[in-house]
Structure formats: C-alpha cells, structure tokens
Image (spheres, rainbow, N blue to C red):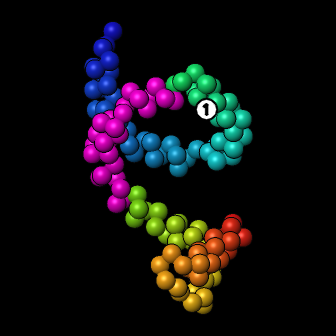
Amino acid sequence: MKTASESMAKFVERASAASADYLKGVESTPKDQAARAIAAKGIYASAVTASITKGSYEKGLQRSGVAGWRAGVKAKGEANYATGVAVSGSKYAERSAKFDTARASSDAMPRGLKGSAQNLAKVAKVVSSLIAAK
C-alpha cells in the first residue's frame, strides 16, 4: 500500500494532466450545481452546526494556524489573486451597480468638519440607502 506521501505525489502529478478533463466534465454535465447546492442547504447547515458542536471547526483552524494560512497564501493565493480579480471584475461591477445610487445619495449634502454631526448624517444617509437598495 502506498504511503500518504506517495499517494499525494501521484495525485499532484496526475492532476496537472487531468485539468482539461475537469473542465470538460464541468462543461458537459447536465446537473445544475447551484440547484443541487440549494436543495442540500439543510444538510449543509446540519454539517456546519455539527462541526462547530464537535469542535472540528476550531481544530482545523488551530492545526493550520497563522503559519499555515500564510503558507497557503504564499503557495497559491498570491499567484491566483490577480487572476481571480480580473476574471470576476465584470461580475463585481454588474452586481455592485445597483448600489451606485445609494453610494451617491449623500453627494448633495454639505460636508462638515471631521467627526461632525453633519458628516455622520451623510454616513447615515448612505447606510440607509444601501439597506434600502438590498
């Protein structure tokens, strides 16, 4: 039987060759990923609750810790960050556009001194407009 290290090495080696198969599978499946996830939301909620109740959530985070998080960012996050932002930029603009009017709702209000009630009123106007836009 292979060791965990041997299995991992084989998996990593074979995964690079399987990238095209992964994409082909996604493009050819008749299954609706979003509909299936929505239908399973009760199972998801139960699993998350069970993880928290058993302490698995904390154990996983503690096992990785700050060093693990930083190592993951260095190993994969840094390289994928710009690509992710670039690929999702138009989606962000499209979904965020509905809040443009709310964000500009206080533009006509005069500015006051830093920390003034006048400026807090501007913030309150934007917040209430954003809540209404949701």
Q: In this view, does 103 lie to the left or right of 70?
A: right
| Residue drawn at x 40%, y 58% as measured from the top left | 84
| Residue drawn at x 60%, y 88% as measured from the top left | 109
Where does residue 58 sit, x and y in percent of width and height? 49, 29
Residue 101 in the image: above or below residue 34: below
Question: What's the magenta bit mostly, secondary-structure-wise?
Answer: helix
Viewer-closest of 47 and 26: 47
Q: In this view, does 14 lie to the left or right of 106?
A: left
Given the image, on which type of amino acid does mark 1 rest? Answer: Val
Q: Is residue 67 magenta?
A: yes
The quadrant in which residue 101 appears is bottom right
Q: In this view, does 124 lie to the left or right of 5?
A: right
For the C terminus, the quadrant is: bottom right
From where the camera sits, is residue 96 visible? yes
Q: Does the magenta stretch include residue 85?
A: no
| Residue drawn at x 39%, y 45% as measured from the top left | 20
Where does residue 73 sit, x and y in percent of width and height? 32, 45
Viewer-closest of 43 and 102: 102
From where the camera sits, is residue 16 visible? no
Secondary structure of the residue carrying tag 1 is helix
For the N terminus, the quadrant is: top left
Where does residue 77 sit, x and y in percent of width and height? 34, 48
The quadrant in which residue 123 appears is bottom right
Where does residue 105 sit, x and y in percent of width and height? 63, 82
- Other residues around mark 1 within 10 Å, as few (<14) / some (14–19) / many (≥20): some
Viewer-closest of 123 and 21: 123
Residue 64 in the image: above or below residue 73: above
Q: What stretch is highlighted in magenta?
A: 57-83
Residue for badge 1:
48
Number of marks in picture: 1
